[in-house]
Amino acid sequence: KLLLEVKDLTAVIAETKQEILKGVSLSICEGEVHAIMGKNGSGKSTFSKVLVGHPDYDVTGGSVVFKGENLLEMEPEERSLAGLFMSFQSPVEIPGVSNADFLNMAYNARRKKLNQPELGPIEFWAHVYPKLNELKMKEDFLNRNVNEGFSGGERKRNEILQLAVLGADLAILDEIDSGLDVDALRDVARAVNGLLTPKNSVLMITHYQRLLDFIKPTYIHVMENGKIVKTGDISIAKALEKEGYKAISDR
Ligand code: ADP
Ligand code: MG
Ligand code: MG
C-alpha cells in the first residue's frame, strides 16, 4: 500500500528564489526502506526538509501525497502528528525544555491525534525505559534540556530515541551515520531495525555505503542536482562504491 507519493516536486529557497529541487519523483510503500544517496549539495537535505515543511523553502510545483492526504497543505506540526518523523542533520537545541518533558508532550499529542488516552508519568516512563536501554543511554539523559550540550553522537541517539518513543509511519533519517563510530552506529541501526514493521517505512539519506550494511534498503535512489537520476536495489550502492564513491562524496 502506497504511503508517500512525490511527483515532480520543485522547490526554491524562500529568500533567494533559487531553485534547489528540480522535479523529484519518488514513491514509498508501507514496510519499505528507501535510501537516497548522492553528492554533497545535490539536494538531499532540502528534499527531506521540504517534506516536513521547513520554512526556508517554498514549493513551486508538483505534489506530495502522504497516507492519501495532500501533505503540502499541512502545517509542519500536523505532518508530524500524521506520522511523519524527521531527524535533522543538525538537530536544534531547545533551551529550558527537558528531554523527558519534550518527549512526554510530543507523545501525548500524537496519542491524542490517534484517539488514544494520554499516558501519565509512570506509564510514560515504562514506555520510554526499555528504549533508553536499547540505545544504551543513561537515565539522566532525560533530565537534560533537549540537545543542549549533547555531543554529536548523543544527539543522534537522542533523535532515534525520539523516533522510538513517538513512533512514525514514515521516518526520514538524514545522515544518522555522520559522526558516529561503528559501535554507536550499530546501536542506532539496531534501534531503527527494531522499529521496522510491515506498516512503517524509513527514508534514509546517506553519503556512505556503510550505513546500508546495518540497515538494509528495499530501494536506493541517487540524487543529482535536485533530481532522482537513478533508482534500483542494493547493487547501485555496490556499483557506486566500486566506481569510487569517494569521487562523488566530497563533503
Ligand atoms: P545535500 O543534503 O545533498 O548535501 P542540500 O539540500 O543541503 O544538499 O543543499 C543543496 C544545495 O542547496 C546546496 O548547494 C546548498 O548550498 C543549497 N542550499 C540549501 N538550502 C539552502 C539555504 N537555506 N540557503 C542557501 N543555500 C541553500
Ligand atoms: Mg550536505
Ligand atoms: Mg545534507
Image (tube, rainbow, N blue to C red):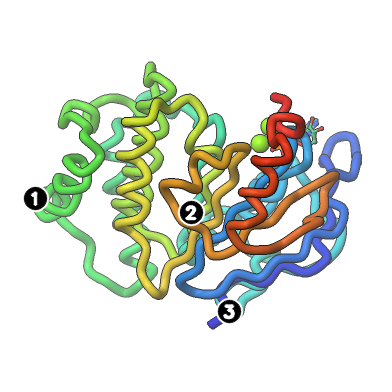
Instruction: Looking at the image, tell me whether mark 2 or mark 3 is earlier in sequence order.
Output: 3
Mark whose residue sits in front, 1 or 2: 2
> For mark 2, what is the residue?
85
Q: Residue at x 76, y 30 (%)?
A: 247
Task: Give neighbour class at mark 1: few <14, some 14-19, many 20+ (Cα, 10 Å).
Answer: few
> For mark 3, what is the residue?
2
Mark whose residue sits in front, 1 or 3: 3
Front one among 238 and 194: 238
Q: Residue at x 61, y 63 (%)?
A: 233
Q: Amino acid at mark 1?
A: Ile
Q: Is residue 157 visible?
A: yes
Front one among 17 and 27: 27
Q: Amino acid at mark 3?
A: Leu
Task: Give neighbour class at mark 2: few <14, some 14-19, many 20+ (Cα, 10 Å).
Answer: many
Task: Give neighbour class at mark 3: few <14, some 14-19, many 20+ (Cα, 10 Å).
Answer: some
Question: Does residue 123 appear to the left or right of 45 in the view shown?
Answer: left
Mark whose residue sits in front, 2 or 3: 3
Question: Does residue 52 appear to the left or right of 222 in the view shown?
Answer: left
In this view, 206 is above or below 33: above
Q: Residue at x 21, y 47 (%)?
A: 131
Instruction: Looking at the image, tell me whether mark 1 or mark 2 is earlier in sequence order.
Output: 2
What is the CA distance from the residue labelled 1 to the residue labelled 2?
A: 25 Å
**Secondary structure under the numbered disc 3 in the rendered image:** strand
Q: Is residue 55 visible?
A: no
Q: Which mark is residue 122?
A: 1
Outermost residue, front direction?
A: 242
